[in-house]
Every structure is written in C-alpha cells, then in structure tokens.
Amino acid sequence: MKPSLKLRPTRTPWLAPLLALCPFLPIATSGAQAALPPPVADSAAEPVRYVGREQTDKRLYDGALRHAVGVHCYQALRANRACPPEGGAIGWTYNHQPYLAYWQDRFYLQYLSTPKSEHVPPGRTLLMTSTDGRHWSHPQVIFPEYALPDITNAEGHLPAGTPAIMHQRMGFYVAPNGRLLTLAFYSFCMQPLPQHGPNKGQGLGRVVREIHANNTLGPIYFIRYNRHAGWNETNTTFPFYKSSTDSGFVAACDALLQDKLMTLPWWEEDRATDGFYTLRLDKAEPKAPSFVHRPDGAVLGVWKAHYALSPDEGQSWTRLVGAPTLTPCGAKTWVQRTGDGRYALVYNHSLTRNNRFPLVVMTSDDCRDFADMLCLHGEVPPRRFAGLYKNAGPQYVRGIEEGNGRPPGAHLWSTYSMNKEDIWVTRTRVPVTGMVTHHVQEAFDGVESTAQLESWNLYAPQWAPIGFGDDPQQSGNRCLVLRDEDPYDYALAERAFPESSRVRIEFRALAERVGHGVLEAEVQDRHGHRPLKVRLDGPWLAQDQMSRWVNSIPVPDRTWLTLRLDINCTAGTYDLALNGNTVGVAVKFAEPAGTVERLVFRTGPYRGDVRALFVEGEHATLGYTSEDLPGADQRVPLSVYYIDDVKTAAVGNP
C-alpha cells in the first residue's frame, strides 16, 4: 500500500488562528510586509541577544570562562593518514562539517572529508553509528568521489574526470513515514580559495539516499538539481529521486522538499530564484542555519552571522539582521530547546576570526535573551596534519535538529570538528550550569559506566580513553581509569566542587603503568588560574612552588597513594599530606586565586595558554599547517592511572 504523504505537524497548534487574523506576504516576494504578530514584531530587529557580562579571553583555549558541569567529550574519529579507520591505502585528514541524528535507538553521524585541505578535491561523505554516543563504528563512505564532466566558465576550465568536492549544510531527515534519509551536496570550485568556494550556486545538486534499519543503504539519487546552473538528469551520474520504485522513499523525499525549515540550509549551495526559498536576502548571504521554536510559537533561525524569525513554519521570514552582542568567527552557531524546557545556544564566542575557540554554551528561558556563558569545550590539541584553511579549535557545531530524534535522557548532544581533522561528540548535562552546591564524595562503588558521572567533565580522545575498571590490588573495588597512548593528546577528568576560599581535597591515585603520559592533579579557580598541582611520574611525586617543580618525593612503584590538600586561598598557600604524613606545609601558590572550584586529573601537561602559539601573517590567517607532526599516526607507550575516593570538604569559612 502506498504510504500517504504527511508533513510534520506544527508544534504550535494555536498559531493557525493567529495567522488567519494576521496574514502577511512571504518576505521573499516584493511588496510591503503586513503586520506581524506582536511577539515577533517586538523582537524582529534583534531576535537574539547576549545579556550576560562574561566575555572570553582570547589568550586561553577555554576563554577563562567557568566550565559547564557534566560535559562528556568523546572523540568519534581520530584522523590517521597511515592507518585510516575508514579503510584505504591513505587516510584522509581533512574532516569537517559533521551532522547528528538519533533514529531507532542509534546515533548517526556524518561528515565530509578530503585528503588534506579544505575545498581541494577529491571529496566524499562518510557515516558512523553508535548506540551510546561514546563508542563509534568505523566510518563508511556513503557519498563517494564523483567525476565531473568537462566544465568551462568565467573562472576557468576543469577537464572531464576532475573529482568533485562536497559541501554540507544538512545531514539527516527523519521523514513523517519513519524513513531516515541522509543528504550531501556535490560541487566544485575552480580554485581552493574562499571566494571560489563550492557553495556559490555552481554545484551539481543535492543527493539523497536512505539508511535502513539494518544500517544498509539505499541507492543514491539527486533530490534537487542546480538547474539554474545547467545541471539536470542528462548530465549527472545519479538518477532523479522520482525514478525510484520505492514509493515510501519517494514520499519521504517529497515531504522533505515541502518542509521549509529543514530545507532552509539548502539556499547557500543552491541559490536558485525559482521560488523554492522564502528568505528576503537583500545583500545578505545567510549560511548554515539552525532553527528552534520559541515559547511564543515563532521559529528562530540562527545562521552564521544572521538571525530572523518566522511565524509560519518557514513560509516567510522577518528581515535578516545581525546580533551586536554576539561575536561569530565564521563558524556555525547552534540553537535548540533543551530537555528542561529552556534553550541553549552553542557557538565559538571568539574575539579573533582566525581561531575558533572556545566553544561556549549560553542558556535562555525565552529564546531571545541568552546569559550564563560557559565553556562547553575548551581543549584544543595541536593540529597533527598539514593542510590549508584548518582553523584551530572545536568548530561547526551541530546538534540534533527538531524532528530528527530524541536520545534517552535530557542531555544536550553536540558534534563538531576539531581543527578540521577530528570529529567529536559531546553530551552535556541538563539543566546546563557552571556550579555545584554540594561537596564531592566519590567512591565509584556500583558505577559501571562513565555515563553515570553526571557531575564530572570528561575529555576522552580515542587513544586516551576514560573508563572504569576493577582495582588491581583490591577485589571488588571500582575505580576511575585514565589511559593514554596518544603522542599529542591526553585524557582529562574534571570534578567541580562548591566555590571555596578554604577547602580540603582528598583522593587516591595509583600509577599502574607509566609509559608516555604522567598524571597531574591540578586545582583551578573559575577562570582557570592554577594555584597548585601535584604530579605522579613513576617513582616520584612532585609538587610545585611558584613556577618551579620542587620537593620531589620518592614513592613506591605501583602503590596506591592517598593525597590530601588543605588549601587556603586567603594565605595563598596549601598543605600536602601523603598517606597521612605531612610532606608540605604552607607551600606557596603558583599564581594567585581568591577561590577555587574544580579538581582536574590530566595525563599530560597543561596547554591552555595559547599566547605562545600566536603567529602573525598569512599562515595564521589561513589556518595553515605546513608539516605533519612526527609520529602522529603511531601510538606511544601506554600509561594507566587509577583514581578513587575523591572527596572535598569545607574548611573554616568557605
């Protein structure tokens, strides 16, 4: 039986009678706009505002912001040229523009890829899946390399057989009939420069295929040609979707083509003037939108640097405007409603256009006024592979679009590329907050998975994973385990505690295996100042005084160490006890801190200060890495550290 075509139901049933009373012309057409509903008219001139006081510090990867509590960052893809996880003789190391969906109890993640640099062919799109958002399958190619016909235009000539490149502004669509579609865009540019990019309307068109419940893939079709640029059924390789004999697939494509919100991102690569798009462009070039329904039923559209409202599900829009209180840096912005009924806006609040860090999250009750700016991802490892236009930092963030699934729980899920070479997925605790009110009592008894650590922040590269394991010296005792065999990254576990001027911190640590990475335990304040740290390095325990490592203490090999830190920010000192014995009294802080609020375990040295890495000139502007880092494709000797019995307590007046 042929399935009936149904559009996604509007999420605001009261909106229809309101629109009947307040009709207005589509803004994409000429003529005067009729009166808008008051909630839309009142905010159309500035649909989004940041009303908080915090600003980022460009000298630090985390912007010197408070960290959102309960953020788990997992590396889904680690680029590797010598041993590619996607298969093939040589790994492709430019990986970017990821998209995320959740369908039939599984996460789906797609991204585009080229061998080395942005906009330099060949290009393809790959897919990974996961049942928990932490462990991901190896990538598989879903939209392969495409050979172009002979092309000559005003910018130059490309001979037949030149490989196409891809450009993504949409990844997935869960249709009303339950089908899951994945999409991509085949294009080309005459030169690998931004002004000649693949998103200027010259590309071939958008392709689509179905992902089946058993993770097999349907055939590739074009769902929309760039007909105005001369592309159609006669000069492209894949057939038009209407030729499919699968009526359910055709119905799913038809529904997508009628959904003005889900097709909103297509304009940038398409740029047709056939009436398919409803934006009033003026001189704007709106790129990479996300959208969300506000409490008043209007739709907020958030592009890279433009913002607009739609009171009729994308059939028309207010004029595209900027947001003076936001500081976009050329990367994408994400907005969504969170599981607590509030709203989150995630983007790179950067004070420099070249570097895309930190990735921040701001929250709102009304989806207009956003505050409480917090760092969502403030770790930036070095770029390992040479390439052009590889901006530093976590960037091009996307979540799960409305209608594309809802994972269990109330978490905020995000995906983004790191340095345009690795792909990450992050789960953030909701409600989003930067502080905790209770002190720490973590024995990890009964904890089976890091997913249960709702108050911990985890940064877990593939070669430096974080998990749980049994105590190698005490049967039945569960411990947090940090492993590290990555030559250029580390594992990091962070636990917030109530902001305190005086606090006692206790934990146990075991160096089960010391290979490449050492274990540093560091206490920080809200801005990332680091007044004190201790380091477990094989047979030595070191502590710091001012900026020097001093007073290294010999410790037994492969033995549990119990450390206690009594911190006095007023005096600018701390006491250190090892296994119940005081080994440091009134040790001076390395730098001042009026209060402290987070404990960080890390399998490598601190790298958060970027001032030494700033480079002026063309290469800094282009995000250019000229050489692969040595040994980037090879694991280093493994380090394994166990953490247990983490406690904090107020001392005197907090």
Image (cartoon, rainbow, N blue to C red):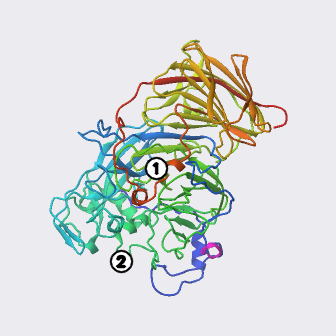
Distance Cα–Cα, label 2 vs label 1: 31 Å
Name the amino acid, label 1.
Tyr
Query: Which part of the image, by quadrant, shows the N terminus?
Result: bottom left
Looking at the picture, tell me which residue is in the foreground, 254 or 576. 576
Comparing 578 with 598, the one in front is 578
Q: Amino acid at mark 2?
A: Thr
Residue 336 at what x, y percent from top left? 56, 56
Quarter of the image containing the C terminus? top right
Q: Residue at the location (60% across, 63% down)? A: 294
Asked if marks 2 and 1 touch (Cβ < 8 Å), the reply is no
The residue sitting at 60% across, 69% down in the picture is 324
Q: Horizontal and vertical percent for residue 233?
A: 21, 66
Q: Nearer the viewer, residue 504 or 141?
A: 504
Camera-side mark, 2 or 1: 1
Q: Which residues are magenta?
A: 41-45
Is residue 510 found inside the magenta-colored segment of the image?
Answer: no
Q: Is residue 479 above or below residue 86?
A: above
Main SS, magenta residues: helix
**In the image, 14: left or right of 285?**
right
**In the image, which disc is placed on residue 273?**
2
Q: Nearer the viewer, residue 98 or 340?
A: 98
- Which residue lies at the image location 57% right of the left edge and 49% below the top edge? 60
Mark 1 neighbour class, 10 Å CA radius: few under 14, some 14 to 19, many 20 or more = many
Residue 179 shows in the view: no
Which residue is pictured at 62% across the width and 46% down the height?
68
Residue 417 visible here: yes
Q: Quadrant of residue 541?
A: top right
Q: Which residue is mark 1?
A: 416
Q: Which image quadrant is residue 87 in?
A: top left
- Disc number for residue 150: none
Q: Earlier along the polypeptide chain: callout 2 or callout 1?
A: 2
